[in-house]
């Protein structure tokens, strides 16, 4: 799907709801679809700028009148949708959750601010900055067995790298049975790494290669988090898996694995540090209420997707 067809599909998904105005916007303020007026746009942008780090599938609710609410919902890591609506809040949020689940990956692929926006450094950041992500290892199984390709911290000893790689790949691949390997492609598991005092999120995948038996190598990204944060890791699992999948795509495209792990560690640490938030309620002052109410009065019978910016 191209950019326009994705946006059209999303707007069609919600057109049966009681929505008068809608905006799809990137966290950096780039408008993708919109039929709000300029003053309303600036107000919504100010909300998004304030809550840009809001977790996916969470939202800000602003009460506009007895009938209308402004809902600003995080569809994907980089995309919000804002709806001025008199639809029942639970019904609207339920539908937006469906849309997020269905379009999250394609939105991030087409519009996301991800790996390409990350500023790499030749120097590894101070390990003390990482409270949650203690170790991260990219490994694969080649002709001589499990091999580490890239790892953080960079002073990880050879024996430690081998133990993490071996446990991640040998235990999970069940003896290199090719049928098991296929099942383990893009699959994640949680396993203990007792020696390190950590719990491991192991994401296994296949790296295509003409040199490999079966035309691909078994590979894994292993993220070790201190055991005391196991519950938090499980709560953040969906978000972390999403970021790992994005990195795996770049690994398969031949990008520098060390840089990718630096990016991934930064993203995962940030996710672990974020508090799981409840929906926010943003109060509006009288001036901003007038902006929104003026929008309500201008309700048109146009299809929402007539306002696409792509």
Image (tube, rainbow, N blue to C red):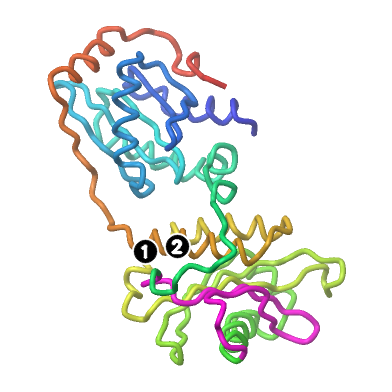
On the picture, is 65 further left or further right than 189? left
Q: Position of residue 231 (x, y in %)?
A: 32, 72
Q: Position of residue 301 (x, y in %)?
A: 39, 8
- Residue annotated with mark 2: 268
Figure check: 11 above or below 206:
above
**Residue at the image point whose x is 84% and y is 75% from the top:** 213
The local secondary structure at tag 1 comes to helix
On the picture, is 17 further left or further right than 220? left
Q: Position of residue 46 (x, y in %)?
A: 30, 31
Q: Quadrant of residue 154?
A: bottom right
**Residue at the image point whose x is 62% and y is 67% from the top:** 258
The local secondary structure at tag 2 comes to helix
Query: In the image, which residues are magenta?
Result: 130-158
**Residue at the image point whose x is 34% and y is 40% from the top:** 94
- Verify whether residue 239 appears in magenta: no
Q: Nearer the viewer, residue 135 or 75?
A: 135
Figure check: 222 above or below 236:
below
On the picture, is 215 further left or further right than 141? right
Kindly indicate whether the residue at mark 2 contacts the one at mark 1 (C-beta within 8 angstroms). yes
- Residue annotated with mark 1: 272
Q: Nearer the viewer, residue 94 or 137?
A: 137
Figure check: 291 above or below 158:
above
Q: Nearer the viewer, residue 182 or 29?
A: 29
Between the C-alphas of marks 1 and 2, the distance is 6 Å
């Amino acid at each position: 799907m191209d950019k326009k067809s994705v946006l059209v599909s999303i707007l069609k998904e919600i057109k049966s709801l009681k929505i008068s105005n809608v905006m799809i916007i990137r966290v950096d303020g780039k408008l993708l679809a919109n039929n709000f007026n300029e003053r309303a746009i600036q107000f919504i942008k100010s909300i998004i700028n304030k809550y840009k780090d809001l977790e996916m599938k969470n939202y800000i609710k602003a009460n506009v009148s007895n009938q209308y609410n402004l809902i600003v919902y995080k569809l994907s890591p980089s995309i919000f949708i804002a709806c001025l609506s008199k639809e029942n809040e639970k019904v609207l949020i339920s539908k937006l959750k469906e849309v997020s689940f269905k379009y999250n990956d394609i939105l991030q692929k087409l519009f996301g601010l991800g790996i390409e926006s990350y500023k790499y450094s030749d120097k590894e950041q101070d390990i003390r900055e990482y409270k949650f992500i203690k170790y991260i290892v990219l490994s694969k199984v080649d002709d001589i067995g499990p091999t580490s390709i890239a790892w953080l911290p960079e002073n990880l000893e050879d024996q430690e790298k081998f133990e993490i790689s071996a446990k991640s790949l040998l235990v999970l691949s069940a003896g290199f049975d090719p049928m098991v390997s296929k099942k383990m492609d893009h699959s994640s598991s949680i396993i203990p790494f007792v020696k390190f005092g950590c719990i491991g999120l192991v994401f296994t995948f296949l790296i295509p290669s003409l040199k490999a038996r079966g035309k691909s190598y078994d590979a894994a990204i292993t993220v070790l988090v201190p055991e005391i944060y196991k519950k938090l890791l499980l709560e953040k699992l969906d978000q972390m898996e999403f970021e790992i999948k994005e990195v795996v795509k770049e690994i398969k495209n031949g990008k520098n694995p060390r840089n990718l792990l630096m990016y991934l560690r930064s993203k995962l640490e940030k996710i672990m540090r974020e508090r799981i938030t409840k929906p926010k309620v943003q109060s509006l002052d009288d001036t901003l209420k007038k902006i929104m109410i003026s929008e309500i009065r201008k309700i048109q019978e146009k299809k929402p997707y007539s306002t696409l910016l792509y």
